[in-house]
Structure formats: structure tokens, C-alpha cells
Image (cartoon, rainbow, N blue to C red):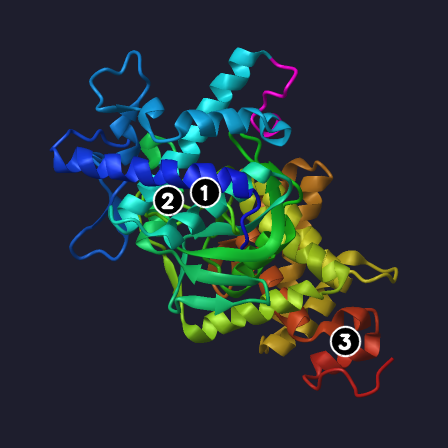
Amino acid sequence: MPVGDQALWSLAEPAIRDALEKMARAVAEGKKIESYDSYPVVEMKEGEIFSAFKNQYRVPDFRKVFGWEKGFQTRPFTYEGIQGFTELVSYVKGQAAYASFLGADRTASSDLLTEMAEFATRGLVLEVAARHADALGFEWDKEYALSRYLEMEAWWRGGKLPVDIFVPIVNVSFEDDRLQLSDSASIERISDEQHQARVIELKAYERDGWLVRAYTHALVIRNSASVEWPFLMGQEQWDVFPYDQVDRAIQAISILVPEPTGYDQVCFIPDGWSHGYRRTLPSVTHAFSAERYDRQVSRGEFSPTETLSSEQGNRVADLYRALEVAHPQVSLAARRLQLASLREDELDEIVDLCVGIEALLGGTTAGDTTYKLGIRGAAVLMRAKFQRSEIVAQLIKKVYAYRSNIVHGQAKYEKKRIVSFEGKQFLATDIAEILLREILAVMLHEPDLISKIDNDRVIFELLDNRGPGAGED
């Protein structure tokens, strides 16, 4: 990447090098280096494969070798003591684009502009120098310093900044370290360093809890989003966020396995730019919390309750790709399966699940809905090796009867809540979830089936376990 502002780099390079030398001198002289205020450190517990985090960080922050001239007399250097710092600040103040980026344009007061320029410039110089010290030590490496400077410069020059999305997946792990879903999306194992980076901005009391320990893998989506990050506001402003891709991955997992899953934390990885560093950690940045996880997930400390094999992982990838091009009714059903898992109220959950089933089986022809759903569901699930079609039809009818009583406000709906099957009792909601997952799996495996759901001959062929006839209209 070429230097965008050669004058800025010409002024910044000697300042960064001098700051690095002063950091080295402070360490050599045994000066006390203050720690980061908040910096979780991975500590692997014996017999466990998931990270815990220390509360006593004690991680040195080389930037704190420096301080303002007044009020910080105990520190060995001031920012003004860095070679060329004053000239660098003056240059930044004189550039309208940088003044705008800093939130203090040229019509603002001179004092405000000076303060913001000094604050930004110290970050530019000290972030690059401290990163150099942590990654390579104190012996000057111009190429490394330039590469880090260019990331900061890209941020300063502003505009729409590209990012990769990084979303930890709750409660479901994978045998494989990497699972490719599409050209831009993959599921990847979270490294210890990525865990540290993502957890820094979580609430301190949550760092040793489920938000850390419930995850082993993250959905990573590349080249799909951009942000604007104005210096003064200190946080990203999203252009468009690819919720559809994130939710599609969760839906694919949910169709395959019944274990509760979802996501809570959303992070991003700057692509070719940086808004600052934290020692040697990767640039995984906490963005926001979404709380889109199954409400059956325990918030206690635990490890994921399901680990998918390589074969199952490949099936998730197949389902993801099928959902990308699925019929709108199939996409609707998958969304309803996901929404049902987010519900706090069981009555809302059963409605979502039944809407999903009806989206797949209802078609466009008139007729008794309960009967139609029962027969068609039984026929479709013959493709999933459900051999007792009459039992499947009866289960669908019982589930739909429960749903109908709820939506029509009938007080007797409680009597329909429990479904008997082979001498055992089950919640109608649990039966509905199983049915929706299985029907979705068939429809995604045979995408033409949704367009033939109104064709009675196709339904009878399915019931006969022969499948849709070749060349069927």
C-alpha cells in the first residue's frame, strides 16, 4: 500500500523512531511502566480446553512512558519531548481534511483544534511505536513501522473503511478449525489471542462467564461491510450490516442439530486500516451486542454442548449454500425457526414454528388447512425416512390444533399443549420444532419440491415412497 500523505509520514517517521528509543531507555533504566487499565490475559485451566481469563492484568503499556508536561512530572518524558512532535502537530492542524476528521474544523477555536491535533498525533506516534516494541522489540525496523503507520493513515484519511465481520457462535463447536460456507463466509476456530481481543470491551463482570466460555468458533464474513469511524465519536458507524448472512449460518446449524445456538457479540476486523492497537493482539474489535441466541442457552459457565463432526460441518455448509438460493417460502420458514428460538414465551414460539410449517406446506390451493398440512407433511417426511406417515400426519394435526386454539383465544388451549406419542408425552412446541427442522432439511435438499407442494399426484407419490414423478408439472 503506498503512502497517501508523504509529508505526514516524513514528519511521523522520526517521531515514531524517537519514541521507540525513549521507550527502550525507560526499560533499560528500570523505570516503572504502568499497565493497561483493562487487558484480559488467557490462562488455560488444567483439564479444560476452553480459556479462562485473569482479572489481574499487569500488562505493560509502553505508551504510558510519556505524559503531558504539566501534571505528570513523575513520568520520564513528555509528548513535546519526542523529536519533531510539535512540527507534526502543526502540520496536522494545517490540513483541513484532518481537522474535519478530528471533529474540529478550521472554523473552530484554535485551542480546540490544537487539543484535538495533539491528542490524535500522540496516538499516531505512540500506537505505532508501542506496537513495534511489543512485536519486534526496540531495534528499529522501518518496514514494520511503515506498515503499521499505513493502517493508521488509512483511518485518518477516512471515508468508508472496509471490515470483515467476526461473530462468535454460541454453544455449538466444530471438529474442524475452518469450514468454508461460501466465497466470502467461513466458520473458523477462535484463537486465544482473538478471544482476548474480543473480550476487552465486554463488561468486566461478564469476562469469566458465558460470553467467553460459550464460544469456540466464529462466523467470519469478508468483503461484505464498511464503516465510518470519526475520530471524535470514537465508534464505528455502519454502512450496511450483513444480518442476512449471519442469520443464515445460524439457521443452517439449527436445521441440522437441535442444540440451542445463536450469537450475542458482533465484532469486526479492520481490513487494511486501524483505529489503534493493543499490544500484539489481532485487530478483532467489539462492535455491539445483538442478543440473538436461543433462550434455552444456559448463562452459567459452561463449554459448548455440541461439537459437530467434519461430516456434520460439511452438511452445515451445504444447508448454508442452499439457503442462499432458496425459494422465498423456504427462507421464511428458516427465519421462523430462528425467531422461535429467540422467544421468551412458549405461545409465541409455537406460532412462529407453525407459521414456518405452513410456509413450507400450505401452498396456494384452498382446502382444510389442518388436513392439508398433515397429509403434505407426512408425504414430505417420507423423504426423511419417516416411514409411519399416518403418525406424522396426526402429530402435525395436534400441533396445529394447539396453535389454532392459541391464536383464536380459546381458553382450552392448555389441554392441547401436551402431545402423546408411543406412550410418552411431549410438548407440542418441541414436536413442532422437530417437524419444521426435518421438513426444512428435505425442502433444501430437494429445492424443486416447494413448487410442487400443491400437486396432489406428487403428494401421493411421496406417500407411496416413490418420490415426485420425472417430468411432473
Q: Tell me the kind of residue under disc 3.
A: Ile
Nearer to me, 325 or 366: 325
- Residue 405: tell me if it is visible: yes
Residue 272 at x, y percent in the picture: 52, 51
Residue 39 at x, y percent in the picture: 29, 37
For residue 197, the mark is 2
Span colored in magenta: 100-108
Circle 2 packing at 10 Å, graded few (<14), some (14-19), many (20+), is: many
What residue is disc 3 on? 459
Nearer to me, 368 or 328: 328
Circle 3 packing at 10 Å, graded few (<14), some (14-19), many (20+), is: many
- Which residue occupies the extreme left position in the image? 30
For residue 285, the mark is 1
> Marks 1 and 2, Cα distance to the nearest angstrom?
7 Å
| Relative side of 179 to 449, left or right | left
> Marks 3 and 2, Cα distance to the nearest angstrom?
53 Å
Quarter of the picture containing the C terminus is: bottom right
Q: Tell me the kind of residue under disc 2.
A: Ala
Asked whether the beta carbons under mark 1 and mark 2 sit within 8 Å of each other, the answer is yes
- The residue at 77%/63% (across/down) is 372
Nearer to me, 200 or 139: 139
